[in-house]
Image: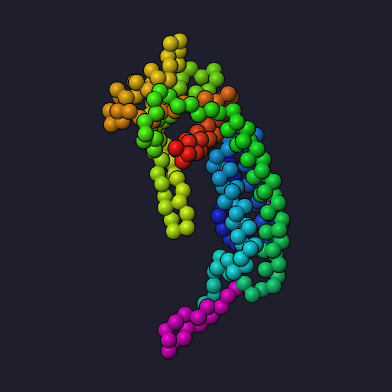
Amino acid sequence: MEKLRQDWVTDGLIDAEYKRYILLAYLKSVRNAFGQTELYPSLGELVFHYNNLLQIKKNKSLLSDQFPNEMAGIDRKRLELIYKEMVKDDDVMKELGDIIEYSLPQVKSVLEEGKEIYDFVESNCELLPVGLMPLYVDEGYFFIAVPQKRETDIFRYQVTLFEQPQESYRGIHVQRVDQMKKGIGVTYEGLKRKLIKKFRDLPNPATFAVESQFAFPLNATLIPVAKRLLVRYVSST
């Protein structure tokens, strides 16, 4: 898939037509991924690029900060480098403005497509507690079950709280630990008992099953959706 540099707006040649070519090639590859219901990493990248464009537009000083400076000379008395800003070129600033104004609606349109697909996937996934829930639910296991697949993918998760001066948010670490075959008489509770015997460091783990109505891509879609469902559940308890 095409990748878009984080500083693609200000990197290299500042030419509106050239930047449009780069952006449209990237968005085409993202749409191709969305067409296969592959949401990540494209959806997360789009959110970053859209917010970055908004921030650049809102705070024009960021434009200056993102550009290299040209050394103009040395003040030998103070031994300080004196820099001459390269962004005092009206033509360059106008070109940047054109790039941003063109790019924002383009990125927003594809981002909305991705969000619609995400909502569709999430609406067709259900998070089910397995067995009795312990008081501590920040760590445990979850299963992902999809139609017409004989195996159930099993993951271990750990939710962590990150605190910053202005906000707190939860992150989640996921690791695949096993894959067990489904069959007649095989229940989620039975799978949970097998995990307890196999991994004795979690004697009473919080365990969930994520059931999908459709066979969405596992790594690019189902795992990220399952992670968000888990974080939402943990945050609400």
Q: Image check: 122 left or right of 180?
A: right
Q: Nearer the viewer, residue 85 or 173?
A: 173
As drawn, the residue found furthest toward the top would be 184
Query: Residue at point 50% right, 23% down?
Result: 145
Count of numbered badges drawn on the protein: 0
Is residue 74 part of the magenta span, yes or no? Answer: yes
Viewer can see residue 8: no
- Residue 173 position within the rendered picture, expressed as x and y whole percent measured from the top left: 41, 40
- Specify start and end residues of the magenta stretch as a single range: 72-86
- Residue 125's quadrant in the figure? top right
Query: Residue at point 60% right, 54% down?
Result: 51
The C terminus: image quadrant:
top left
Q: Nearer the viewer, residue 66 or 202?
A: 202
- Residue 153 position within the rendered picture, expressed as x and y whole percent measured from the top left: 44, 25
Q: Image check: 20 left or right of 5?
A: right
Q: Image check: 147 left or right of 181?
A: right
Query: Residue at point 45% right, 12% down?
Result: 183
The N terminus: image quadrant:
top right
Query: Residue at point 63% right, 63% down?
Result: 58
Image height check: is 55 above or below 213?
A: below
